Image (tube, grey):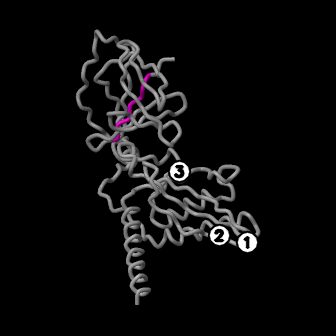
Amino acid sequence: MKFLNQFIMYLCLLISFSSFSQTSVNEYKYVYVPDNYSFLKGNDQYQLNSLTVFLFEKNNFTVLNSLKNYPSDLATNSCLLLKSDLIKIKGFFKTKLQLVLTDCRDNIVFSSEIGQSKLKDFKKSFQEALRNTFVSVTELNYGYSGSITSPKPPLTSVVEKGIIEGKTPNTPAPLAPEPQIVAPPKLATAPQVTDIDNKEALLGLIIKPTISGYDFVDNITKKVMYSVQATMFENVYIIEAQSGIMYKRGNSWFREYYEQNKTIIETLKILP
């Protein structure tokens, strides 16, 4: 009888823990999959990273693994993201893998059951073990439960803002009237683009590295206009105390943020 009571208590705890894990995972909107795992010798070896993306998407997760799909709401709330990692566990004559999901504070939110494979071919063995780790992921029945939604990047109105060149702080640029956005002819699905003068006339910005990112300093006033912090994505930065993100493409820097149902993109003039 005592054993039965202990078993029932253990079963209740197990059910409670499973429910908590499922609810916790559902609170996260995105999952990040790296290009490489620490136990691999190169990016996407044995196609494990690609397979991880595929299996997450199959289980209704929104996967981030490149700059192309970096959402604006994540720039203002980095804790919407789960980071995934695959751990290789030592075993004799078996390939053993475990999937771990951590939050923005590196707390473990979810650990999968250990996936195993006895296949001798390395690629097939790793892929089978990875698929087996996702059995417990599938059991979560993941579905994002939050209310925050990110703007749709390609089809919303896009406004380009350029830093004014050739003007001094003593002659501020006149404020331009609110432009009317007109869709380009014969391109109904193309983003609407209009140039707007900045409210502050700056000759240019100087970039100064910091411990965790960069400071963008006005060349004339020496005022720090933007302080940015690095993210896990290359050349993408979160702006301190301001909305949106800063990113670099080629030799150009851009600030992107969401305002009044529009995606605003500022092109920054950077001095050498």
Residue 245 or residue 20, whichever sits in front: 20
The answer to whether residue 97 is magenta is no
**Amino acid, disc 2:** Glu
Q: Which residues are magenta?
A: 263-269
Q: Residues within 10 Å of mark 3 (few under 14, many from 20)?
A: some
Asked if the magenta segment contains residue 266, the reply would be yes
Residue bearing mark 3: 65
The quadrant the N terminus occupies is bottom left
Give me the C-alpha separation between circle 2 and circle 3. 22 Å
Q: Is residue 115 left or right of residue 23?
A: right
Direction top: furthest residue: 170
**Residue highlighted by disc 1:** 119
Q: Secondary structure at mark 3?
A: loop
- Residue on which the image places disc 2: 128
Picture residue at 41% right of the left edge, 47% below the top: 71
Name the kind of residue labelled 3 in the image: Asn
Q: Are marks 1 and 2 in contact (CB under 8 Å)?
A: yes
Marks 1/3: CA distance?
A: 29 Å
Give the quarter of the image for residue 257.
top left
- Element under disc 1: loop
Q: Position of residue 190 (x, y in %)?
A: 40, 45
Categorize mark 2 by other alpha carbons within 10 Å: few (<14), some (14-19), many (20+).
some
Identify which residue is drawn at 67% across, 71% down: 117
Question: Is 195 drawn above or below residue 190 in the view shown?
Answer: above
- In this view, which residue lies farthest toward the front? 2
Alpha-carbon span between mark 1 and mark 2: 8 Å
88 displayed left or right of 80 = right
Mark 1 or 3: the one toward you: 1
